[in-house]
Image: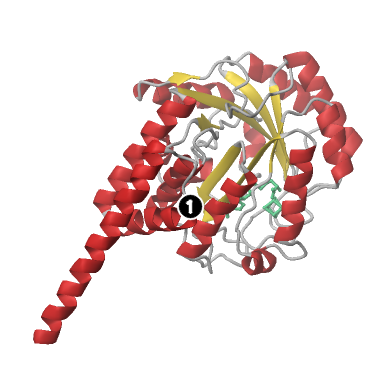
Amino acid sequence: MKERKHTTATDHDTASEARRSFDDALNTAWRRPGELGPDDVRVLLACSVADEECRKRLFAAADEVRRRYVGDEVHLRGIIEFSNHCVRNCHYCGLRAQNRSLPRYRMTEDQIVAVAEAATHLGYIGTIVLQSGEDPAYDGPTLAGVIRKIKKRTGLAVTVSVGDRPREDYALWREAGADRYLLKHETADAELFRRLRPGTTLDGRLRCLRDLRDLGYQVGSGNMVGLPGQTLSTLVDDLLLLRDLDVEMAGIGPFIPHPETPLASAPAGSVDLTLCVLAVARLVLPWAHLPATTALATADHDGRRRALLSGANVVMPNVGPTEYRHLYQIYPGKAAIDEDAMTYVKHVVEMIDSLGRTVGKGAGHSRKPAFTPRS
Ligand code: SAH
Ligand code: SF4
């Protein structure tokens, strides 16, 4: 009995100590966001995961830092998923080459450009994101041609997201006018990365990110939350890696198991945990563009709104043809899969309005003070 009392007192001390460290870290975040150290990041994440009161305070702080640094605008990036062919076999993704049950498609160059042009008529869209599996059919010069035409005919910002490529390809696309590149580091745990992305390494991915930075892209990275084998320490490392890369954008979404992959029976990543990681990311990277990811909207029908209230300031509606949507199955059950581009954008805009926020005007380039986007 005595011993039990003693344990309770110790637990109480530990809890108050943790709460004090949480308060200190949150204070630093208020006063000097972006200067959070590894211990701050760890305590913010650990306490908010364990305690609902801390979680609420973390979300409120992330919302306020978001407002102070990147404002109330929510930028819409229209995504075109132009090919679901992929040579890779990532264990988590339904587009993996070994998923033979998935019918494959490729949009033609003219189709891609036409969809981008149509997106300008939707209003609201300031950026086109060109995404695909790792598909060598679109070689460097081919994709450069598509980018050049989109830039010339629409004037929209262009983000490319087609995975690991040689530096020469990245250079060609940059010369063609690409503004940004999205390449998630996926997990900062090199061993887990090697296991989940056979034939690739975290070092290789980081090499690509360095090349993109050298070439003057606005760089986006990010990670999945809830990958099997990932721990809270891995997530702390993810956040510190994003900070060290000084990314202009970070996509953070829950892992969602796909039935035709080796991770079919793994549990899905937690929505609450993902929101905590997103909120800490806002404190670590106050200037960054942080999307309310489609994966979050898929895992929770209210996920997008919750993300916008916890630090996010970007939404990426799908503006591609509806007939391809269910084939771009990186994970199952994708949110708004049957909505045409116009309806999708309309719903997103209504949701942004309902939060008292505004849709971002223009390209929505990085607001980081040191960053000067090319005109
Ligand atoms: N082939 C490119 C881009 C397409 S995949 C690449 O790999 O970079 C786009 C993103 O989808 C990946 O970065 C990954 O974070 C996410 N993704 C893949 N499978 C997923 C899953 N099962 N659950 C959640 N996100 C997933
Ligand atoms: Fe291919 Fe990207 Fe999916 Fe990996 S995550 S299988 S590279 S589409």
The residue lying toward the viewer, choosing from 345 and 229, is 229
Disc 1 residue type (three-letter)? Gly
Quadrant including the C terminus: top right
Label 1, secondary structure: give it.
loop
Question: Which residue has dot 1 on it?
Answer: 37
Residue that appears at 11% across and 79% down: 5
Query: Whole-percent x and y of residue 351?
Result: 40, 26
Percent position (x, y) of residue 304? 43, 37
Q: Does residue 228 show up?
A: yes
Percent of width and height locating residue 311: 43, 37
Give the image quarter of residue 317.
top right
For residue 177, above or below residue 300: above
Image-quadrant location for residue 341: top right
> Which residue is more in the foreground, 137 or 211?
211
- Image x and y of residue 122, in percent: 59, 16
**Residue 334 visible in the snapshot:** no
The structure residue drawn at horizontal position 70% and vertical position 39%, both measured from the top left corner, is 131
- The N terminus lies in which quarter of the figure? bottom left
What residue is shown at x 37% (from left), y 59% (from top)? 46
